[in-house]
Image (spheres, grey):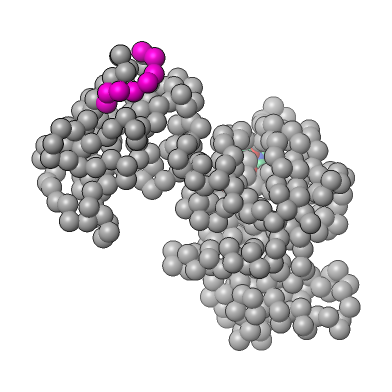
């Protein structure tokens, strides 16, 4: 069991706020992803859970026990970082075994545990190599195995894939997901990559400037972003966000008019996702010249302008047009999200 409770956690350095009012219960065996841009407080939050940083205020509980004053080594937590931290003079076997030696696990258990951990990340063949003779992906797997061998109840991972190339990232990502399931551990995973967050997480915490913006399942966050920050951070491309005005339920901005919206008159930001809109030959809410067209293989991304904003619309793979050609797209009220322009909050 490893339920983690963060009770009103704050971290300040002088007047600078690193993390503000972080309140969350992470369930046993949950895969929680902390997501946000550089400097938003993800790593600081994780370091506080690990015991490497003290919160300025608030309590951290693991399985009901307050651990604020507990040393990192006593917290039953294993960490994996983006820099692998392997010992260059030790071979793979010795690197993986190292935590067992430090923790004075009886020698008799070492071999079996190292073999089990290395098999899980498919390193059996490389046990006698030194880190210098391994690829980046293999080194990352040694770092994973070194965390696995401890058999902790909680894993903390800080951007563990960021040094890998795109293809390896995808395969290692799948491996991490599978491992967390097999090991039955509670996982807290830090990333600034929204695709990693969406694919790995049971729940995502989106942070900005030390403040939690939204907590939810990937689907909740994708379908119902709490504000324009979350809307613009999640999805590829990000949600189209157009500032305009509503009068009698009709939203207008340059090159776009959407009717039958239920919102009070006034300034508003309208959001819609590229894949929810469609190019049309008939009447469309959007009528604009093509700004760019990108062939994605399985689809064509058409971009048009609304004033200084761009609107992306996903068309079929066969769709073709030309830059400057006048096109229409259907963006019905049913696919639209409305946000307060001043605060960014969802209406
Ligand atoms: P990244 O993705 O770049 O690692 P992050 O979201 O993990 O970013 P943190 O490392 O948690 O961000 O840092 C949050 C903020 O706290 C940053 O603005 C950082 O400069 C600041 N910060 C971190 N450590 C300290 C410190 N020891 N003293 C002062 N400010 C700090």
Question: Where in the image, quadrant-wise, is ligand 1 located?
Answer: top right
Q: Quadrant of residue 55?
A: top right
Q: Quadrant of residue 94?
A: bottom right
Give the percent coordinates (x, y) of residue 227. Answer: 48, 31
Say above or below: 23 vs 147: above
Q: Quadrant of residue 132?
A: bottom right
What residue lies at 57% left-to-right and 36% top-to-bottom? 214
Q: Is residue 264 magenta?
A: yes
Q: Can residue 193 be spotted in the picture?
A: no
Span shown in magenta: 258-265
Please tell me whether the stretch drawn in magenta is mainly helix, strand or loop.
loop
Instruction: Judge by depth and name the residue closer to the eye, 333 or 82.
Output: 333
Q: Can residue 9 be spotted in the picture?
A: yes
What residue lies at 57% left-to-right and 75% top-to-bottom? 138
What residue lies at 17% left-to-right and 56% top-to-bottom? 318
Give the percent coordinates (x, y) of residue 22. Answer: 69, 35
């Amino acid at each position: 069991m490893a339920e983690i409770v963060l009770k009103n956690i704050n971290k300040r350095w002088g007047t600078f706020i690193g993390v503000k009012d972080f309140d969350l219960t992470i369930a046993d065996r949950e895969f929680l992803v902390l997501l946000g841009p550089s400097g938003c407080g993800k790593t600081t939050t994780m370091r506080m859970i690990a015991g490497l940083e003290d919160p300025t205020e608030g309590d951290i509980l693991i399985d009901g026990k307050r651990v604020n004053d507990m040393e990192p080594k006593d917290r039953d937590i294993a960490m994996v970082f983006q820099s692998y931290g392997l010992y260059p003079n030790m071979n793979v076997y010795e690197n993986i075994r190292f935590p067992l030696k430090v923790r004075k696990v009886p020698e008799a258990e070492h071999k079996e545990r190292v073999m089990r951990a290395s098999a899980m990340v498919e390193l059996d063949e490389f046990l006698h190599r030194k880190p210098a003779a391994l690829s980046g992906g293999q080194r990352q797997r040694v770092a994973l195995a070194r965390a696995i061998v401890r058999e902790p109840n909680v894993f903390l991972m800080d951007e563990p894939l960021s040094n890998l190339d795109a293809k390896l990232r995808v395969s290692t990502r799948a491996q991490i997901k599978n491992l967390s399931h097999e090991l039955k551990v509670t996982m807290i995973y830090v990333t600034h990559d929204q695709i990693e967050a969406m694919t790995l997480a049971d729940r995502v915490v989106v942070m900005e400037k030390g403040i939690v913006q939204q907590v939810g399942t990937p689907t909740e966050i994708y379908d119902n972003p709490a504000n324009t920050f979350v809307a613009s951070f999640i999805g590829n491309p990000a949600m189209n966000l157009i500032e305009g005005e509503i009068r009698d339920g009709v939203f207008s901005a340059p090159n776009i008019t959407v009717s039958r919206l239920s919102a009070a008159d006034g300034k508003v930001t309208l959001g819609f996702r590229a894949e929810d809109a469609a190019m049309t030959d008939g009447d469309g809410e959007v009528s604009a010249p093509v700004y760019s067209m990108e062939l994605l293989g399985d689809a064509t991304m058409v971009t048009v302008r609304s004033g200084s904003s761009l609107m992306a619309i996903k068309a079929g793979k066969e769709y073709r047009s030309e830059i400057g050609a006048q096109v229409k797209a259907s963006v019905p009220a049913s696919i639209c999200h409305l946000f307060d322009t001043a605060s960014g909050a969802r209406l």
